[in-house]
Each structure stands twice: as structure tokens, then as C-alpha cells.
Amino acid sequence: MKVDLHNHSYFSDGFLSPKEIVRLASEANCDLFSLTDHDNTDGIAEAKDEAHKLGISLVNGVEISAFWRNSAIHIVGLGIDIDNDFLQTGLEFNQTLRKERAKKIALGLWRSGIKDALEKAQKISGGNMLTRTHFAQMLIQEGYCKDMKSVFRRYLSGRKPGGVRVEWKDFNEVIKWIHSAGGKALIAHPFRYRMTHTKIKKMLNDFKEANGDGFEVVNANSSAEEISLGNQWIEEYDLLASVGSDFHGWPNQRVQIGNLADLPNNSRAIWGYL
Ligand code: AMP
Ligand code: MN
Ligand code: MN
Ligand code: MN
């Protein structure tokens, strides 16, 4: 069974259309696939349509920005009803925060001498929702940095020129948005938050207490050690395991759809519960 439940289209910070992404998933022989754009579900209808044509199973998905204590983290919602009002009101709240943040990022960049950042980032996003990825790609294209890693570190995080703190909702709230839409809530890429293992385990414990359903055990760049630890924590906190590449598809990125390690233990795989 080939599964990839975390992918982005140009409706958030991916490069390709939902249609192109579903085609890639089909070419990679995925049996089960999800489009999980950041804070919106605008690409799902197009993805559904193409998935139907190509005979591949598509799970409705979204990746929602949230807070755990003082850290910004991502919660993936899978198997959601995209017409659910409570969920969509939550997503609209996040979209508003993003619009406000984009202006502040541009202002910060302007103060450090980078002009017209908002307009240039909007050109790259094609008028769709703005994310930090669009600012990052713009700064690379303009020659300020050579790659994504350095541009986030030097311009788009913490106290750097385009670093802006956003007051996302607590993950307790976000879990409710997902559950009211009939979906499962999963912590995305737990090893990518610059947290110690002790802190990740605290987060998993709080997530379980808040009725969260699981977390991603396998991403595109997971090490064998991370997968084995994740598998252990799934048991320890009685959670479900998900698998997703976090594909974005920009020409300067290497991650491929459906090219993922297997889960060590399939009995707690999320697809048995969707
Ligand atoms: P945003 O949701 O607008 O805050 O943008 C966050 C997105 O930026 C993430 O979903 C990633 O796709 C991307 N991102 C963050 N840090 C990095 C990094 N170091 N390298 C590449 N992409 C990153
Ligand atoms: Mn992203
Ligand atoms: Mn993420
Ligand atoms: Mn993602």
C-alpha cells in the first residue's frame, strides 16, 4: 500500500496545480493520497475531480497553523468535510492572520532595504494565499539568498527583518475545528520544530489529552531513528500514525510525491480509521 497524506498545491505554498499533483501521485502509484494545503481547502474540488478521472483515492485534507504553548506548529486534518462551517470559519480566521502578517513581513523587509516585497511575493503566488514560502522564493530570485534554508534563517524567522509573530489559535481549538468537520487531527512533522525529544513528548501528551488523534511518523526526510522513535511514541501515547511527503514541488526542491519509508507498524496507521 503506497500512501502520501501531506502535499501542497499553488492554493497555498506549493508550485503545481492540484490536478498536476494528483497526476504525479497517480504516476507514483499511490493508492491513497491527500492534498493538505495550508489553512484553506480551495484546491480540493479540482483534486477530487482529477482523482476520480485517474482512479486514485483522495482524502480531503488541510494543514492548519496552530499554537502549542508558545510554539507555532502545524496540525494536519484528514478526512474532513470541506463544507463544514465551523471548520471554514476557523480557516478564514487563519487566512486573515496571514494577510495581516504578509503586510508586516513586507514592512520589515522594506526597513532593511528590500522594496516592493508584497507585490513581488503576490506575483509569485499568482494572487493566491500568501505564505512565507512566496517571500522566500522571491528573495532567492532577487539574489538575496541562495537557498530556502538560509533565506528562512536570515530573513523570515525570529527577530530577522521579515520575522513576524502570529497569534495562531491553540491546538485544542484547531482539533475541534477538524473534529466538527468529521476529520482526524494529526501533528505534522514533529521533528521539524526545533524541540528536544522531551519537549516533543510533552507536546504529544498534551495533544492526546486534547483529544488529538495522531502524528506523522514518516515524512520525506525522516531518518531511521526518527521513524523508530515516532513508532515508539505512537504506542506510548496511544495515537495513530500518518505518512506524508510534505511535497511542495518548487524547481529548487527535491522531495517527490509517494517516495516514503514504510511505517514499522501498520496496525495504528491512520488509513484504517479514516
Ligand atoms: P508559513 O505557513 O507561511 O509560515 O510558511 C511556512 C512554510 O515555509 C512551511 O510550510 C514550509 O513549507 C516552508 N518552510 C519553513 N521553513 C523552511 C525551510 N527552512 N526550508 C524550506 N521551507 C521552509
Ligand atoms: Mn509549506
Ligand atoms: Mn508544515
Ligand atoms: Mn506541509
Image (spheres, helix red, strand yellow):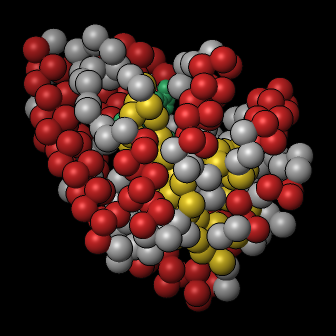
Q: Quadrant of residue 274?
A: bottom right
**Whether residue 204 can be seen here:** yes
- Residue in the picture at 86% in, 57% down: 266
Of 218 and 110, nearer the camera is 218
- Residue 43 as seen in the image, left or right of residue 131: right
In depth, the one of 217 and 69 nearer the eye is 69
Front in this rendered view, residue 139 or 216: 216
Choose top left, top right, bottom left or bottom right for residue 184: bottom right
Which quarter of the figure is the N terminus placed in?
bottom right
| Vertical relation: 58 (above or below) 68 | below
Q: State the residue at coordinates (26%, 48%).
A: 94
Q: Residue furthest front?
A: 209
- 25 over 240 or under it: above or below: below
Residue 60: image x %, image y %?
51, 70
Q: Position of 185 compared to 240: left or right? A: left
Whether residue 28 can be seen here: no
Measuring from the top left, give residue 152's x and y in whole percent: 40, 22
**Could you tell me residue 256's position as x and y percent?**
66, 50
Q: Is residue 90 above or below residue 118?
A: below
Q: Which residue is found at the position 52% from the left and 38% from the top? A: 252
Give residue 198's quadrant in the image. Answer: top right
Q: Picture coordinates of residue 8 (x, y %)?
A: 48, 54
Please give the name of the residue rendered at 89% of the width and 46% of the height, measured from the top-left corner: 264
